[in-house]
Amino acid sequence: MTEVALNAAHSTVSVNETEPLTLAMDVEQARQDLLLLLLAEDQASTLLLEQCLFHINKGSDISDIVSDRSVEPIIVQAADFVQLSLGQTVQYLLENPSARSSLLRLRFLSGFLIEVSGLFIAMNKQRHCFNAYRLKLGQAAQALQRLRQQMIAGNVRLVAFVANKHKTTALSFDDLVQEGVVGLIKAVDRFDPYRGYRFSTYAVPWIKQAVSRLIVKQEKIVRLPVALAERACAVFEAMRNAYLQTERWPSVEQLKVLCDLSEDEIKTIRSYYQATHSLDAAGDTEEDEGLTLMARMKQQQFALPLDELIDRNLGQYLDHVVATLPEKEAAILNMRFGLKNYTEMTLQAIADQLQVSRERVRQIQNDALKKLKNQFGCDLVLFLEPHDRY
């Protein structure tokens, strides 16, 4: 039933593609209107450039400001026809307001334009000369935000479709959907409806990237850089293919040729994906007796000082309380439990040595233990571990 529902949802994406395309055109038109409105006012365009330069100097990804990094963002033609970098260009435009028409060549993201608009309105609330302009700017920003949210909400089913194909035991379906929506937002802000592509075709890779990066980040206790972790799939695919062909695992030199990675990168990937174990995990076998891995890793060659002191005091106290019993009962307990330099003996061995029946030895032992419990039980409780039963 789940597969049928997902296939039906996916078919709906294809049938109703004209509606998202129309909405995408409306979003693009609203984005252009807001950009033109910001550039129409010198102080607003200055703020736009200042925020752009702030993000660049902070080390933010340029793709969070401008949608297409492959195209030269701005070409400023000065007298000497010098082509500048984006940061240098922004600085040049700040110093030369007459050249700001070049900003139209940049396709600023909708989210960035909305952020700048809100900042300008907040900074000029008390300036009455901007009342009419602030009203127009606020209306344009709200229109773009409304259309943008409408397009995001209308394509959430794409996120569910992709997240269902990337199910993992380490992450819940809700976590995958939440991260997939982040990729969907990036796709909505960067989609150009006039290039002739369907939005679903453009958005799915962005959603897959966001979901897969979340899985890479969360699936291991020690995090590997995302760029390197994404290339790990190629390494393991090459290892699997080589093993199927030769029945031997490939060497590092062979992997270097197959994956086009350095030796250090391959070693890092291989060591990173070794099995990890929690020190707090309890053992599954009967031999482990439910102990955690940390408890089983404790060295047993030398006793801990506190444990050794407790054992010594317990031994001395047991010698004292056993000595209060009749001679025969004391001898049986000493032999049965290895007290006073005796080695632990079975009931039958004690019976053979005392020339009595095994059942008689058991009765004497139980009577002696009952006497000790009634007389010294409260004192002996202090020597018990918290999980021992009395």
Image (cartoon, rainbow, N blue to C red):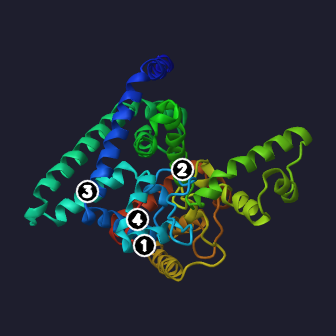
Q: In the drawing, what numbered circle is on residue 91?
A: 1
Tag in front: 1 or 4: 4
Tag in front: 2 or 4: 4
**Residue linked to disc 2:** 213
How far apart are the alpha carbons under marks 4 and 3?
21 Å
**Residue linked to disc 3:** 117
Q: Give the amino acid type for the residue marked by disc 1 in the picture.
A: Gln
Is residue 60 in sight in this rendering? yes
Q: Position of residue 73 (x, y in %)?
A: 50, 57
Mark 3 or mark 2: whose residue is earlier in sequence: 3
Is residue 325 in sight in this rendering? no
Q: In the drawing, what numbered circle is on residue 99?
A: 4
How far apart are the alpha carbons under marks 2 and 1?
34 Å
Q: Residue at x 63, y 73 (%)?
A: 299
Left or right: 166 as drawn, with respect to 254: left
Q: Position of residue 6 (x, y in %)?
A: 47, 22
Mark 4 or mark 3: whose residue is earlier in sequence: 4
Mark 2 or mark 4: whose residue is earlier in sequence: 4
Q: Residue at x 54, y 50 (%)?
A: 213
